[in-house]
Image (cartoon, rainbow, N blue to C red):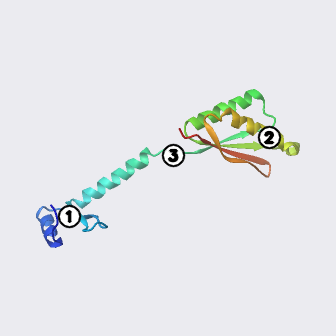
């Protein structure tokens, strides 16, 4: 409708039983629209709800390993970790040490490194292995394509 006085715009809005809504207050001069404000708010709320519904939520999946894990069990864990990563989730590997296993932490680190090698085509290390008490933790994130 072009440039007009605020009073004139308000009069036009009242004639049509609608509201005068300021759309771009930072523009020079400010931009206003004649519309149904209730309907406008409803549509904004609906758009925000749809955006939240379509958003991908990433989870952190946990896999527990042991230093003396057998090959078949290890490959089962790798397969499960691979499926988590392909779904877009992060994976936290927890190496649990019991008793005298604490004397051979390097064995646990080797198992974690072997796991990282197995999934290196679809994952990257997000946080290197660090020991906290009797647990060594390593985080993996899916690669961006």
Give the mark, 2 or 1, whose residue is nearer the N terminus: 1
Mark count: 3
**SS of the residue at dot 3?**
loop
Binning the other alpha carbons within 10 Å of mark 3 as few (below 14), some (14 to 19) or many (20 upward) gives few
Point 63% across, 41% down: residue:
124
Binning the other alpha carbons within 10 Å of mark 2 as few (below 14), some (14 to 19) or many (20 upward) gives many
Contact (Cβ within 8 Å) of mark 2 with mark 3: no
Quarter the N terminus occupies:
bottom left
| Residue annotated with mark 2 | 108
Q: CA distance from mark 3 to mark 1?
A: 38 Å
**SS of the residue at dot 1?**
strand
Is residue 8 positioned above or below 93 on the image?
below
Front residue of 1 and 90? 1
Point 29% across, 67% down: residue:
25
| Residue annotated with mark 1 | 19
Give the mark, 3 or 1, whose residue is nearer the N terminus: 1
| Residue annotated with mark 3 | 57
**SS of the residue at dot 2?**
helix
Is residue 50 positioned above or below 2 on the image?
above
**Quadrant of residue 39 in the image?**
bottom left
């Amino acid at each position: 409708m072009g440039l007009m006085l605020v009073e004139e715009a308000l009069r036009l809005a009242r004639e049509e039983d609608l509201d005068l809504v300021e759309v771009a207050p930072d523009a020079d001069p400010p931009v206003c629209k004649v519309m149904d404000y209730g309907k406008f708010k409803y549509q904004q709320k609906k758009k925000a709800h749809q955006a939240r519904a379509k958003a991908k939520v990433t989870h952190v999946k946990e896999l527990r390993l042991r230093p003396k894990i057998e090959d078949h069990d290890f490959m089962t864990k790798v397969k499960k970790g691979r499926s988590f990563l392909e779904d877009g989730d992060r994976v936290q590997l927890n190496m649990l040490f019991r008793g005298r296993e604490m004397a051979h932490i390097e064995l646990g680190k080797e198992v974690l490194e072997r796991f990282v090698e197995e999934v290196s085509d679809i994952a990257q290390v997000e946080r290197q292995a660090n020991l906290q008490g009797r647990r060594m933790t390593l985080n993996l994130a899916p690669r961006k394509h």
